[in-house]
Image: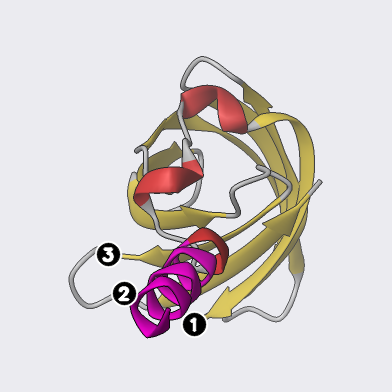
Amino acid sequence: MLAGAVGGLILACASISPTYAAAGCAVDKLQGAYVFDGQGTNVHYGVFNFDGSGRFSGKQTSIRQTNSPVRETLQGTYTINADCTGALIMDGQPGGTAHWDIFVTSDGKKGRMIRTDAGIHGVRTFEQ
């Protein structure tokens, strides 16, 4: 009887313990418009429009070292792995192409990003 109770407890715990592999993410998890904010050396607010196939466009207003707002058009590509992690390559900012690691919730409604280019720091949070 004790073995049955322990086995039942193990099964119950396994069924409520989430794993990344069970997330089932793919590139189509990001689809539609997502507002974002971010900071690092600069401050940014804007919108990403993800197409669900690995491409995005967007717009942002940035406050850079000049302290004057700058409006920028963004575009690029992204990937999403089964564990809801991925990468994003962004064009359209001053200074050229930016590379980001991205982390998406399993429902695809929210995400976070961290810039991975050497010597440049930045984070962004986005949500639908």
Work out whether 2 lies above or below 83.
Answer: below
At mark 2, the secondary structure is loop
Q: Which residue is mark 2?
A: 120
Looking at the picture, how far across and down is residue 49, in whole percent? 71, 30
Residue in view at x 66 percent, y 42 percent: 108
Q: Residues within 10 Å of mark 1 (few under 14, many from 20)?
A: few
Residue in view at x 35 percent, y 47 percent: 21
Circles 2 and 1: CB atoms closer than 8 Å = yes
**If the image is split into quadrants, where does the N terminus sit?**
bottom left
Work out whether 13 lies above or below 84.
Answer: below
The part of the chain drawn in magenta is 1-14
* Amino acid type at mark 2: Ile
Work out whether 12 lies above or below 83.
Answer: below
Q: Which residue is mark 3?
A: 116
Mark drawn on residue 72? none
* Amino acid type at mark 1: Thr
Instruction: Quote the CA–CA distance across marks 2 and 3.
Output: 7 Å
Looking at the picture, how far across and down is residue 7, in whole percent? 38, 70
* Amino acid type at mark 3: Thr
Q: Reply yes or no: does residue 9 show up in magenta.
A: yes
- Report the side of 53 relative to 6 (left or right): right
At mark 1, the secondary structure is loop
Q: Residues within 10 Å of mark 2 (few under 14, many from 20)?
A: few
Q: Mark 2 against mark 3, which lies toward the viewer?
A: 3
Instruction: Quote the CA–CA distance across marks 3 and 1.
Output: 14 Å
- Report the side of 117 relative to 127 (left or right): left
Q: Which residue is mark 1?
A: 41
Q: Mark 3 against mark 1, which lies toward the viewer?
A: 3
